[in-house]
Image (tube, grey):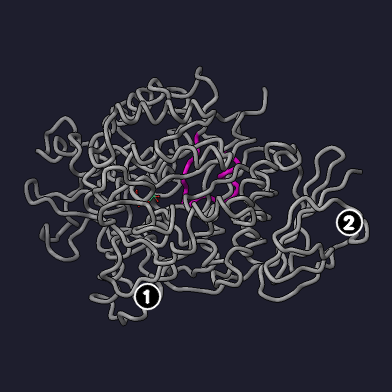
Amino acid sequence: MDNPWWHRSVVYQIYPRSFADANGDGMGDLRGIIQRLDHLAGLGVDVIWLSPICRSPQDDNGYDISDYQDIDPAFGSLADFDELLAGVHERGMRLIMDLVVNHSSDEHAWFAESRSGKDSPKRDWYWWRPARPGMEPGTPGAEPNNWGSVFGGSAWEYDPATGEYYLHIFSRKQPDLNWENPEVREAVYAMMNWWLDRGVDGFRMDVIDHISKDTSLPDGVVRPGSLYAEGGPHYMNGPRNHEFLHEMHERVFAGRATLLTVAEMPGVTIEEAARYTDPARREVDMVFGFEHVWVDRGPDPWVLYPLRLTKLKGILGRWQAGLADVGWNSLYWNNHDQPRVVSRYGDDSPEFRVRSAKMLGAVLHLHRGTPYIYQGEEIGMTNAPFASIADFRDIEALGHYAQAVEHEGHSSEDVLTVLRARGRDNARTPMQWDDSHQAGFTTGTPWLAVNPNHKEINAAAAVEDPDSVYHFYRRLIALRHDDPVVVYGDFTMLLPDDERLYAFTRRHGDTELLVVGNFSGERARADIPGAEAWSSAELVLTNAPARTGLDLEPWQVVIYRRRA
Ligand code: GLC
């Protein structure tokens, strides 16, 4: 079989709410994206992934869908969508949709029907359960099990109309669909086929390792200091997950032109990822694992640890090795759920922001796999200066704050410190297009404040400046398109015990690349085995003015190429 096009591709994620607002209501929309397509074509990306744009009460910014086959009026119409898709295709790019089918919105017609009574034909489309035996329904502790919701509070919502509870791993407005029921699966496949028939090129599948649950829904383990249990072990990567994805492949993807499917899987291990992405198993093309973005947190996601580079290299190196023979890696630092990488693993001070953003981009893009760029990453956007909880909008941040401060006794300042570093709103501040009022994002009042640093950090300035992060990313993308070693080269990690340098080689045929990134604000020398042999190699790309061999400046990255 020919290698699929997405091996050579770079994907750009748009979070439509925060990308570009054409109608001045303060929220991004499809016409805003249409107006900015040339920015993406200029960057050279191959695929656009759109975070959800379907009809939604926006409880979790669209990850709560009330109609899978319509566009939310805040984003536009199906006609706008068709125009956008045509614009993407005209520029030689592709477009993938966000598929959010672990749960729907509680305002979806399916849920309204399911909720209407115990004998509703759709009752079993969601997870309804009676109170814990011997407990009065609706009273504290009577929930069917002790799982906490990802956004704080219990994972169960009591519905007085029928005296039962429904499961919601995320907010109470995101009831979990019951994939055990074949009618649910058929409805989802029909909807997916409808989008593909409309011309979309694939899907990013939201928390798709949550769809098969342990149907006995057992109690989980409660961490000291928490009110609820971590239910993940009972609903992540469950017994039928592979079966469901294989069935989806049969019912939706088989027989179509090559598409791109990428499965978000917070609970995935490398061994499982190799199975999910083994082409022979016909499940999905790649997965988003989380280990490398959880490297700086503990078992409690809300406890901060500093980055240990050796640990990060250990994780990414294992993923490279684990998917070297079968399967394929996705490569990402950022998305709408993660803080900005330059503030997290780099240095966002005026002195080193540009340089460290480029280093991080180069190290990621030179791994084997398909790189994902999250909007604003290509201009080195940073975390935002949130002053108080009132500046946050994210349901996760607000839910965590309420639980931690009001119910678990943590101080407001401590919780804010963590939210400033980790909160998802860092990624969601509006795209910084220029230095004008509201960064050119909107003529109105943005739904989430624009980062004041848009005066210096913006796309217009970056496009003008040949030394910008933007032009560096353009070169990285071009390098992938031009040199098969970037796409197919074997990966070998070097210096695994070094806390400052991230070094590896890639080899394909007679071509070898050496990549060394300095993850520190100090000079560092890369004492790699066989360093001599690289002294006459071609310097393909670097982010600091002088060629310094393997003596690296703070935050410098070098990419060398040689032919055997
Ligand atoms: C995924 C999304 C996240 C959302 C959650 C529930 O992790 O990326 O934004 O809140 O699923 O849909």
Nearest to the observer: residue 146 or residue 304: 304
Q: Residue at x 39, y 52 (%)?
A: 234
Picture coordinates of residue 52, whole percent (x, y): 35, 41
Name the image quarter holding residue 359. Answer: bottom right
Picture coordinates of residue 159, whole percent (x, y): 12, 50
The answer to whether the residues at label 2 and label 1 have Cβ atoms under 8 Å apart is no
- The region drawn magenta spans 261-276
Q: Residue at x 43, y 52 (%)?
A: 433
Q: Residue at x 33, y 48 (%)?
A: 17
Q: What residue type is disc 2 on?
A: Trp
Q: Can you identify the residue that label 1 sits on?
A: 224
Q: CA distance from mark 2 to mark 1?
A: 52 Å
Q: Is 164 a magenta residue?
A: no
Residue 101 visible in the snapshot: no
Q: What residue type is disc 1 on?
A: Pro
Q: Is residue 409 above or below residue 333?
A: below
Q: Is residue 376 above or below residue 204?
A: below
Q: Can you identify the residue that label 2 sits on?
A: 534
Q: Could you say whether the residue bearing mark 1 is in a helix, strand or loop?
A: loop
Q: Could you say whether the residue bearing mark 2 is in a helix, strand or loop?
A: helix
Nearest to the observer: residue 482 or residue 194: 482
Among numbered discs 2 and 1, the one appearing first in the sequence: 1
Q: Residue furthest left?
A: 161
Picture coordinates of residue 280, whole percent (x, y): 61, 28
